[in-house]
Each structure stands twice: as structure tokens, then as C-alpha cells.
């Protein structure tokens, strides 16, 4: 019996956990522009989505009911872009994943690509870029007698753009940057995130070739090449070790086995892949687009926690068929930020149907995640989903036609399709297939929380209960206790005090080999890729750590991403002690310790600080940034900021900025984020180059100075190379008077001349 059916048949909105209701209300509930709800319940959101995706059918009423039935009780989870955007008539895309066009090694084309990225992210799409096409740092730029700044300098510009687009709405921007293992700047790419705060809107992955892995194994030399020119030769093994060391220290870059990705691509005959979406479950060609959806396995378990527990495989196959049709219709219902993306999507009709709730489903049928039996069962489920998806797509092709670039002979000869049974291949041979690629496994973090906190994607349960850091729309954070779906179901069935079985493992108790075993088993029956993180213990040796990646390559994975606890990246989730029962869990959630200095501290009569001089672009007068510190327990920390200049044009925002920063500093706690936030502010009028790096705005330069000060005083501890410092020199503090002065010559005497403010001393005019 399905565990959901044991509950009273209340509306879904009343059955799900409070955090699930919040996720729905914040991210997926349709509202008017003034905030008035249009979707009154989760059921309304399902109905809106089903109706919108059925509208392209010849019999929309029939398919609306079938689509609604698939959505009901969270059995099928379309990705967030679909659930939030379908049927809203908003100018958003329903696609989650994009890889942008190839970046030509030309300044004008580089910034044309930046514009395309901004337009795509504005509509809610995550993007991937391969920066291997940009010439390395120091290479000659013919015709202008200059040296190239290299791909990383342009990645900084992309990062600032992403932060700016993110600031316009509640959805966080997401980007993937890839670089080939033979690019001359690959070592700088590998080390980029050693600098705290740099490229924080990017995930980074190295494109690793089979030839490189062979060179690592043989301990051969490895040529770093661009444009047919070999810049230098390095040790392949030393380069591999640098990738591993960076990942060991701060979890990036990831590794993509790019030759394997291309060899096992159904469309090998008409496209070449060299990047992925931000979470890497969708390797895509230039302008490639893919939408996502997941079958919630936890809802398909019958008679859970008994000897007869099993997954309803007949319902699974039926659900997959409906889900494929919904996702195929989404291609026609969606808008696209760029016409090139639209054309690419229509030509190949790619979809990414995946799984979620895998770990919960395994616990509910009595299997331990990571065991050989669990891997075999998971592989069987993945095979069923993959096969059912191909059958459904071939049958839709019989009705609506195959994807336009379908070519039977090379398609059937592809690595994935050639491994299908003859019945499936016969259907494809007879009818073609509607969707070139069909299966992919995404991380599903937010939609899994929406679905009453089922385990995310194919990941193990992070913890039976945990404290989640939730970002509010105003940027503030709060903490909430969350309990796993299967754990809650088990305690409802056997009592709040019942000890959990040994099969209820968490990410912290699994070995790296168990993670890889599960990923490899699933990858064998997923035609695209899998977003999966291999959690490793903090005390794992470096040599053992390297073996994780070699094992992933040996077992046929398309990539590998690990996470080892580290000081640079921090965490979104933190584990709480396991509550003994529901009452204790509620009590734990209610008791949130109050941080010290929640209210502003009074200012002492005397403070120690430093003043920094900052020159910006063509401004006649420098800015002087004074940062005063307070000492607590022998440690200096920033307490207040003042900014002064003879140029008074921006007096109001300067005062506002210093007051807000000082207000944050005076409340104490972890305030280093202030510098990071300021450093990401992007000025559409342009920034300036400083010390070989692009500083995207004056505000970003001020943020850099604040970060520099924090490091110099020991408040902010940096591991590895120090971050880039804005060129600003400490000076002796000087007093200055503030008043209604000319912003150019700093003299009084500005009056209105007609409609314009004009200085009678130097001739400055507000209108000129």
C-alpha cells in the first residue's frame, strides 16, 4: 500500500511539511503583480500546469486529466521552470538548461556572447560555456599591439553579469564554465577558486580527454596547445594532481570525461559537445537546450517497510509514458530567450526525464543505499525508466513525427540505442523517435523539498533531519528543521520512538566507493548524464581521494564531482543531533540560539582604523575609505566605514552606503559577506582594470578595499594565494567638511542657471 494513501485525504497543501508549503508559496505559486495569489492551493498549480501543457494536443481535455493525474501527489515532478512558468503567460522559458554558442576569439563576439548569456539568464535559464576557445593570457593580439588578458579575465566579467541579473529577482543565477585539459591557461583555471569570492556564480569543470587519462597513466608529457601552437609541455600526472589537489581542498573543479560523453551521444553524427548545464546532468551542443522532469520513486513504493515492499513497476512504466508526452509538449509550449536556442530545441527535441526519491524508495523496500543489491535494484529501475521513455517517444513519433534531424541508420548505430532490445529498436526503425535524447538525472533539490522532502535526485539522504539555511526574499536568513520523507513515514507507521533500521543510511556514513557504485549503475541506463556528488570524509588521504576519480573513469561514469568539507565553500545544510521522537524534533526546531550582538553595539569613544585612497577612472578627486575596528577577545573586527571625497556629486549614495555597511558591522557576527556582495556589483557603464583584473564598478572597488582591510587585520583568514587587491594605498586620516559644494571643484557657489545646477567657479553644470 502506498504510504501516502494511509494519510487522511486532506488537500496536498495541508498534508505536506511546512517547508514544502513555503517552497510552493515562494517559488511556484502563481500570483498577481501585487502579490495577490491566483493559485490558492498546490492542486491549482498542478491544474494550471496540466492545462497549459495539454493545450497543444488535438484532445486537450483528455490529456489535461492525464497530465493532472501524473502530477497529483507529486508522482511526476516537472522541473521548477515548468511548474513556475507554465500557463502564466509570463515572458519566461520553461527550459532549465542551456549551453551557449561557441565564443569566437574576438572582443566584439565575446561581448555579444555576454549579452546572449544575460538575456538567457534573465528568463530563468542556467547556462554553460566553454572558455577553451579564448586565446591564453599573454598571447599576442594582432593589429592592436597588445597581449591577451586570457579567458579567466572574461570569466570575471561573466561572473559580475550573473550577479547583476540575480539581483533583479529572487532566482539565483547559475553558470558552468568548462576548459579543455590542453588549454595553456588550464592551470590558472584549476586554481581560480582558491581566491575567496572569485567566480562564485560559476561551477567549474575540466574537459578531460581519453588521451590525457592515458598520459596520466603512463606518466607522459602533455602539450598545452592553442590555435595549433604548443605553448609548453607539462607532466600529465602533475597536471592531474593539480586538478585533484584543488578539488580536494575546495571541491572544484569537477571533471567531465568529454570523449566518453561524445562517443555515447545519440546525436554523435550531427553535433559535438564541449560543455554542460550548471549541474552537469545535461551535456549539450552550442545553443543546446533541455528541460527536466523527475519520476518520484518514493510515491510508487507499495507496502513499504514490510517483507512485501516493492516498487509498482507497471505504474512506473505508465507514468513514464505520460511524463514523456508532457515534456515533449513543453518544447512547443515554451518560449526561448534566443532564436538559435529555439531552432536547436525544435531540431532535436531533447528532454531530460530523470528520477528523484531514489534513496527513500530504497529504504522503503529495505535496501541499504550503496550496497551491491541496492545498486542492482537501482539499475533495474533506471533501465525500466529508460526503456519506457524510448517506447513512449517512438509511439509519439508514429502520431506526431520524429525529431527533424532523425536519421535511422546512424541513430540506431549509436552506443546507447544499439544496446536497446530488438522490440524498442524495431519501433524506432518503423516510426522514428520523437526525442533525440530522453533521460537525464538532475539534482532536484528544491522540487524534492516541495514534494514533502523526498530524497533529492539519486543522492543518498543527506541526514534524517537537518537544519536548512533558508534565504528570505529580503536576503535575510533563517534556519528550519527538516525531516526526511521516508523517516517521517517510518515513524508514523511504527511510532515516534521506533529505532530506525540499519538500511537508513546517510551521505555521511557512505564510503566513496559506494557512491561511485551507485552512479555507475545508474549511468549505464541514462542516455545523457547524472548530477551526483560523491561525499568524502574530511580526513580522507589525498592518495585515496585521487582513487575516487580513477574509479569513476574506470566504471564508465561521464564525470565526477566530489565534496570534502572545507573552509572555502562552506555548506547549505548542517546536521542536527538525531531527535529521539517527533516532540524532541519540534522542540529542537523551536530553540534557535540568538547570536550575540543581535542589536547594534554602542560606539566606543576611540577606535583604531585605517584610511585607504582610491582612484577611479577619470575622476579628478580620489575617494578616501576609512574603516575603523573594534577589538573583541583579542581579535579586531570592522565596526564602521566612512567614505569622503572632494567630489560631492554622489554624496547621497555615499552616505547611504556607509551607513548601511556600518549598521551591519555594528551587529557583529559573520560580516565578511559584505565585501563579497559589494565586489559583485556590476556597473552597466563599465568598470576598470586594476592589477590585471577587471573591477566591474566603483562599489566593487570599495568592496575589494574592505576585504583587503579584513585580511590585513586578521579578521578574514585566507587559505592559499591572497585575493586580488584593488590598488588603494593607506593614508593618514584627514578631516573634511561636507556641504552643498560643487562636485567638481569642491567650492561653494552652485546655483540654478535656468533648469540646471551650475558652478560659477569652475563652470561645472549638471546638464553637461
Image: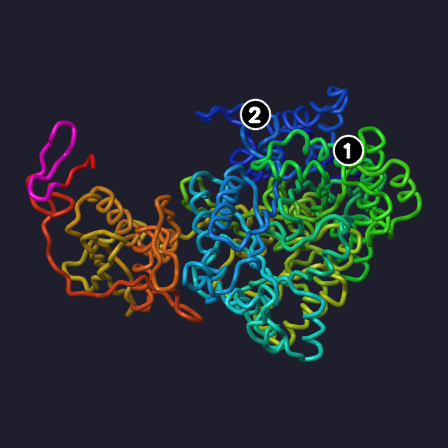
Residue 187: percent from left, percent from top: 53, 69
Residue 743, above or below 346: below
Q: Nearer the viewer, residue 516 or 414?
A: 414
Task: Examine the structure image and report whether residue 550 is included in the region drawn in magenta.
Answer: no
Q: Quadrant of the C terminus?
A: top left
Left or right of 544 in this view: 595: left
Residue visible at 24% across and 49% down in the picture: 658
Closer to viewer: mark 1 or mark 2: 2
Residue visible at 26% across and 51% down in the picture: 662
Q: Earlier in the sequence, mark 1 or mark 2?
A: 2
What stretch of residues is rendered in magenta? 750-763
Residue occupied by mark 1:
322
Number of marks present in the image shown: 2
Q: Nearer the viewer, residue 685 or 546?
A: 685
Residue 57: percent from left, percent from top: 74, 23
Q: Nearer the viewer, residue 164 or 642?
A: 164
The circle drawn on residue 441 is none
Q: Residue furthest front?
A: 143
Residue visible at 42% across and 45% down in the picture: 164
Q: Quadrant of the N terminus?
A: top right
Q: Residues within 10 Å of mark 2 (few under 14, many from 20)?
A: few
Q: Residues within 10 Å of mark 1 (few under 14, many from 20)?
A: some
Q: Distance of mark 1 from mark 2, alpha carbons?
A: 24 Å
Residue visible at 19% across and 64% down in the picture: 608
Residue 265: percent from left, percent from top: 76, 52
Using the rendered view, name the quadrant where residue 624 is placed.
bottom left
Left or right of 144 in this view: 296: right
The circle drawn on residue 89 is 2
Q: Secondary structure at mark 1?
A: helix
Amino acid at each position: 500500500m502506498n504510504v501516502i494513501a494511509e494519510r487522511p485525504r486532506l488537500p496536498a497543501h495541508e498534508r505536506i511539511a511546512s517547508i514544502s508549503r513555503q517552497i510552493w508559496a515562494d517559488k511556484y505559486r502563481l500570483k498577481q503583480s501585487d502579490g495577490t495569489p491566483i493559485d490558492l492551493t498546490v492542486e491549482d498549480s498542478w491544474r494550471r500546469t496540466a492545462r497549459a501543457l495539454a493545450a497543444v494536443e488535438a484532445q486537450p481535455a483528455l490529456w489535461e486529466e492525464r497530465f493532472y493525474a501524473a502530477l497529483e501527489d507529486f508522482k511526476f515532478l516537472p522541473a521548477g521552470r515548468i511548474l513556475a512558468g507554465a500557463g502564466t503567460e509570463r515572458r519566461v522559458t520553461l527550459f532549465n538548461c542551456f549551453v551557449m554558442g561557441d565564443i569566437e576569439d574576438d572582443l566584439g563576439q565575446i561581448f555579444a556572447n555576454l549579452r546572449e548569456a544575460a538575456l538567457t539568464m534573465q528568463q530563468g535559464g542556467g547556462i554553460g560555456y566553454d572558455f577553451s576557445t579564448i586565446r591564453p593570457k599573454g598571447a599576442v593580439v594582432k593589429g592592436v599591439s597588445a597581449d591577451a588578458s586570457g579567458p579567466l579575465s572574461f570569466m570575471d566579467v561573466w561572473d559580475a553579469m550573473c550577479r547583476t541579473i540575480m539581483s533583479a529577482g529572487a532566482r539565483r543565477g547559475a553558470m558552468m564554465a568548462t576548459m579543455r585539459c590542453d588549454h595553456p591557461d588550464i592551470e590558472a583555471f584549476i586554481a581560480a577558486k582558491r581566491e575567496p569570492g572569485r567566480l562564485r556564480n560559476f561551477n567549474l569543470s575540466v574537459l578531460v580527454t581519453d588521451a590525457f587519462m592515458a598520459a596520466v597513466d603512463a606518466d607522459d608529457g602533455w602539450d598545452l596547445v592553442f590555435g595549433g601552437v604548443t605553448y609548453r609541455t607539462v607532466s600529465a600526472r602533475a597536471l592531474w594532481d593539480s586538478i585533484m589537489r584543488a578539488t580536494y581542498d575546495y571541491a572544484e573543479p569537477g571533471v567531465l570525461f568529454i570523449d566518453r560523453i561524445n562517443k555515447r551521444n545519440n546525436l554523435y553524427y550531427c553535433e559535438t559537445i564541449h560543455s554542460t548545464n550548471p549541474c552537469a546532468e545535461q551535456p549539450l551542443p552550442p545553443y543546446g537546450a533541455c528541460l527536466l522532469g523527475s519520476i518520484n520513486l518514493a510515491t510508487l513504493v507499495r507496502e513499504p517497510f514490510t517483507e512485501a515492499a516493492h516498487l509498482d513497476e507497471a505504474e512506473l512504466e505508465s507514468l513514464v509514458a505520460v511524463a514523456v508526452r508532457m515534456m515533449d509538449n513543453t518544447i512547443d509550449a515554451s518560449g526561448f530567450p534566443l532564436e538559435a536556442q529555439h531552432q536547436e530545441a525544435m531540431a532535436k527535441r531533447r528532454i531530460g526525464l530523470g528520477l528523484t526519491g531514489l534513496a527513500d524508495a530504497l529504504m522503503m523496500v529495505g535496501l541499504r543505499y550503496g550496497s551491491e543489491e541496492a545498486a542492482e535494484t537501482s539499475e533495474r529501475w533506471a533501465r525500466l525508466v529508460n526503456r519506457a521513455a524510448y517506447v513512449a517517444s517512438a509511439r509519439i513519433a508514429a502520431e506526431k513525427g520524429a525529431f527533424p534531424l532523425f536519421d535511422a541508420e546512424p541513430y540506431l548505430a549509436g552506443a546507447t540505442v544499439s544496446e536497446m532490445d530488438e522490440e524498442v529498436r524495431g519501433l524506432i526503425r518503423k516510426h522514428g523517435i520523437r526525442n533525440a535524447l530522453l533521460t537525464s538525472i538532475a539534482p532536484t533539490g528544491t522540487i524534492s523539498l516541495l514534494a514533502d522532502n523526498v530524497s533529492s535526485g539519486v543522492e543518498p539522504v543527506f541526514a534524517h533531519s537537518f537544519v536548512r539555511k533558508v534565504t528570505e526574499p529580503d536576503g535575510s536568513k533563517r534556519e528550519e528543521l527538516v525531516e526526511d520523507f521516508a523517516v517521517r513515514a517510518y515513524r508514523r507507521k511504527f511510532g515516534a520512538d521506533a529505532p530506525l533500521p540499519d538500511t537508513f543510511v546517510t551521505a555521511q556514513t557512505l564510503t566513496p566507493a559506494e557512491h561511485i557504485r551507485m552512479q555507475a549503475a545508474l549511468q549505464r541506463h541514462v542516455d545523457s548524464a547524472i548530477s551526483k556528488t560523491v561525499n568524502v570524509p574530511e580526513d580522507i588521504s589525498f592518495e585515496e581521494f585521487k582513487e575516487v576519480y580513477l574509479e569513476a573513469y574506470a566504471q564508465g561514469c561521464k564525470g565526477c564531482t566530489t565534496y570534502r568539507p572545507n573552509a572555502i565553500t562552506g555548506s547549505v545544510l548542517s546536521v542536527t543531533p538525531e531527535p529521539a521522537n517527533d516532540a524532541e524534533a519540534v522542540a529542537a526546531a523551536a530553540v534557535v540560539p540568538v547570536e550575540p550582538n543581535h542589536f547594534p553595539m554602542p560606539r566606543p569613544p576611540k577606535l583604531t582604523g585605517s584610511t585607504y585612497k582610491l582612484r577611479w577612472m577619470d575622476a579628478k578627486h580620489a575617494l578616501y575609505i576609512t574603516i575603523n575596528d573594534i577589538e573583541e577577545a583579542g581579535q579586531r573586527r570592522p565596526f564602521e566605514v566612512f567614505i569622503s571625497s572632494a567630489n560631492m556629486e554622489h554624496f547621497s549614495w555615499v552616505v547611504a552606503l556607509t551607513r548601511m555597511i556600518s549598521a551591519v558591522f555594528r551587529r557583529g557576527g559573520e560580516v565578511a559577506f559584505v565585501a563579497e556582495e559589494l565586489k559583485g556589483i556590476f556597473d552597466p557603464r563599465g568598470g576598470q582594470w586594476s592589477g590585471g583584473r577587471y573591477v566591474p564598478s566603483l562599489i566593487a572597488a570599495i568592496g575589494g578595499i574592505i576585504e583587503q582591510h579584513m585580511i590585513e587585520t586578521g579578521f578574514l583568514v585566507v587559505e592559499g594565494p591572497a585575493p586580488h587587491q584593488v590598488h588603494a594605498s593607506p593614508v593618514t586620516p584627514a578631516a573634511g567638511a561636507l556641504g552643498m559644494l560643487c562636485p567638481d571643484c569642491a567650492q561653494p557657489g552652485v546655483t540654478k542657471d535656468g533648469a540646471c545646477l551650475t558652478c560659477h567657479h569652475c563652470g561645472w553644470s549638471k546638464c553637461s
